[in-house]
Amino acid sequence: MTKKLYYENAYLTEWETNILETIEKEDGYYVILEETAFYPHGGGQPCDTGSIQGISVIDVLNEDDQVLHKVASLKSIPQEGTVTCKVDWNQRFDHMQQHSGQHLLSAVCLDLYKAMTLSFHLGTDYCTIDVEASELSTSQLESIEREVNRRIYQNHRILSYWVNEEEVKSLNLVKQPKVTKDIRIVEIEDVEYNACGGTHVSSTGEIGMIKLLKAEKHKGNTRIYFKAGYRALEEFNDSQRILGALSAKFKTGKHEIMDRIEKWELEQKQLQAELAILKEQNDEYVAAQMLDGQEGNLIAHIFEDKTLKDLQNLASKITSQSDAFVLLATAAENKVVLAQNNNSGQSCGAFFKEHLGNFNGKGGGSNILAQAGFPTWEDAQAFYEFASQQIKDQM
Ligand SMILES: [Zn+2]
């Protein structure tokens, strides 16, 4: 049976031990050690990574109380004898900060709002706990964040030890453990006793800081997103970078950015309104020109850069002044519009429905207005040419 060093000392990251067994499975190579500080997945905490005799440890599993180290290869790992093992300390310490942070955060949620923690997730980016509360207000979350950081700065010792079923009854445990013998207790002095197998920092000061990111409703409870330690620092740096870039863009201090954005939004609205008036005037002018260019019963034109909405507006402007068919196309969107003022006895929509299929087009419309989109400009153009010919010849 492997001796689990991570239970005794979470700070041990380098040791020498003997190989007990090497295993080749379908999904890879595994090593069993006499002693291991590699923490396997469990209790919401992800596994450690690192190396055995220089070979990468990529996964660590607990199977029937046996710790299996999945390694990249077995090449330089001997079948038996002594090997040197190393745990990736940065990752381990990060897990310790998040996990101890979670215990403390859960204790505060329980103390302040009687919100019991139901589950914990330690992700690669952020952590979450689900607490038994249908809702937590912004001010409640602020109180939780303030209190949990206060307890960090009080620097409570964090201890771990084993107790039996009798001893556990004398401790006021947060949750009764499922196991009945050899129960591992993680105690935050003067705060709480918790049955937990994870790796923890030795005092709350090492958590550094806990930053709550957001809270949302989840299955009738509340999910709190948070980051502890270096992750909280990185979050702060990230926000600083974004804020700095915004400050530079708006050429103002961070407190004035929101004002500037509101002003900018107002300017945008005014510009949109001005643009709408100018477009309207331009349409009047273009419509007048196109009315002059009428050929028989057709007014047709191809535009490079108009939207479908532009075409529809322009077409209705022209049909209000002429009995001709108006056929417009835009290369910007591969779209074609046909309109009339209903004096011809023909239907634009029916005409589109009948012929679009031959040009890979999709669309339709009413008697007086139809529109269609095409996969390519060549298709749109071919349909446009076809429609102009048909209208000139027959409609
Ligand atoms: Zn725990």
Image: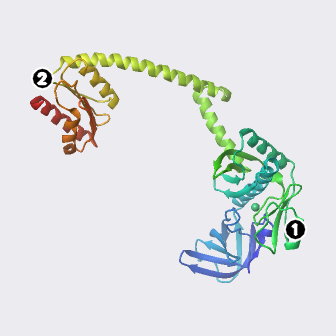
Which mark is drawn over residue 296?
2
Question: Viewed as shown, does residue 72 lie left or right of 53?
Answer: left
Q: Residue at x 71, y 47 (%)?
A: 232
The residue that appears at 65% across and 70% down in the rendered structure is 60
Q: Residue at x 74, y 43 (%)?
A: 141
Q: Quadrant of the C terminus?
A: top left
Depth order, front residue of 192/354: 354
Quick one: SS at disc 2? Answer: loop
Examine the rendering and report whether any part of residue 307 can be seen. Answer: no
Total residue callouts: 2
Q: Which residue is mark 1?
A: 169
Q: Is mark 2 within 8 Å of ligand 1?
A: no
Can you say whether 35 is above or below 191 in the image?
below
SS assignment at label 1: helix
Q: Residue at x 23, y 31 (%)?
A: 367
Image coordinates of residue 36 in percent, x first then y, are 73, 73
Q: Residues within 10 Å of mark 1 (few under 14, many from 20)?
A: few
* Label 2 vs 1, first from the N-terminus: 1
**Residue at the extreme left of the image, as rendered:** 393
Quarter of image, ligand 1: bottom right
Kind of residue sitting beneath label 1: Lys
Q: Quadrant of residue 335?
A: top left
Which image quarter: residue 184? bottom right
